[in-house]
Image (spheres, rainbow, N blue to C red):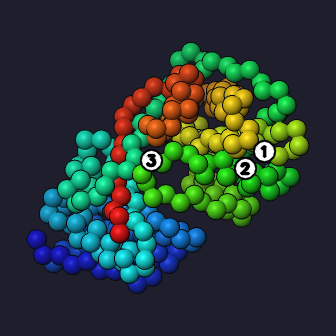
Amino acid sequence: MTMRVVRLANPDNGNPAWIAEGDDGRPLGSAYLFIPAGGGSADLRITVHPAERRHGVGGRLLRAAVETGRERGLPALLGQAVEEGSAGESFCAAAGMRRVLALTYTRLPLGAEPAPTARPVPGYRLVHWEGTVPDELAETFARSRKAMDDMPMDAAAWVPDVWDVDRLRWIADAVAERGEILLTTAAVAGDGEIAGFTELVVPGDGTGDGQGYGTGVLPEHRGHGLARWMKSEQIGLVRSRFPKLGGLLADTADSNTVMRRINDGLGYRPTHRSLLYQWDL
């Protein structure tokens, strides 16, 4: 197949992107690199039209991304999660990418028996909000995001995000613009600081499945059962707030045994596994 890979002149956010075209100008696939402002590894997204797969399109796009990554001195390109046994996994393995993380996807059916409850944790109180964090909690919520910095990522060259109030609001606005609802439950310690949080995103029409966006507890507050308490209370609120919602989805690293045990105890059941592959530069 004759093709050419064209680098886009003005990709969004200043990040490099490419499109693969056939000799007749038809689009075959695309690639995009998201390079974090603070440095570190870039996230790589490659998409090839199903009819054009197994013709070298993905490989050409990968080579273009690798070349740019080397020019910019990046340590690695971290690919998107691909389902185990899928064509995406076959491509990553054949292309020479390294498997660095395994994720188990789970689902909690909301139409089944209610999830087990959890006892309140003395010395803490729970707060809940939809959308953007309330102004009075914004600064402490931004500080609490560090609770995710040490989540198990195995061999992935992952760099934690840097959070501030502006980023919190930007994420909430992005979710709202998609027509979805961001739900947050946070545990507040006696000094007024947020000790942990759990987030869900629900479709705007309240049907289908909600997606877990992350749960974290700051190291100095771990070991008290905060994560289970927050998640259990949030599940109860979701049941009453969105009675037509079918279930809740979560994805957890296989090595994150603590969170997997919590989710298992709340009734989440495995649906499939995905793998994360990386190109080391």
Precedes in sequence: disc 3 or disc 1: 3
For the question of whether residue 19 can be seen, the reply is no
Task: Report, in whole angstroms, how far the alpha carbon at label 2 lies from the one at label 3.
Answer: 22 Å
Q: Kindly identify the residue that appears in the image at 26 percent across and 55 percent down.
A: 92
Task: Categorize mark 3 by other alpha carbons within 10 Å: few (<14), some (14-19), many (20+).
Answer: some
- The circle on residue 154 is 3
Q: Which quadrant does the C terminus fall into?
A: bottom left
The answer to whether the residue labelled 2 contacts the one labelled 1, judged by CB atoms less than 8 Å apart, is yes
Precedes in sequence: disc 2 or disc 3: 2
- The circle on residue 194 is 1
Q: Kindly identify the residue that appears in the image at 56 percent across and 15 percent down.
A: 113
* Residue type at the position of mark 3: Asp
Q: Kindly identify the residue that appears in the image at 38 percent across and 81 percent down.
A: 71
* Residue type at the position of mark 2: Ser
- Numbered disc 1: secondary structure: strand
Q: Which residue is mark 2?
A: 144
Q: Is residue 103 above or below residue 232?
A: below
Side (left or right) of 157 relative to 274: right
Query: Looking at the image, which is closer to me, 10 or 264?
Result: 264
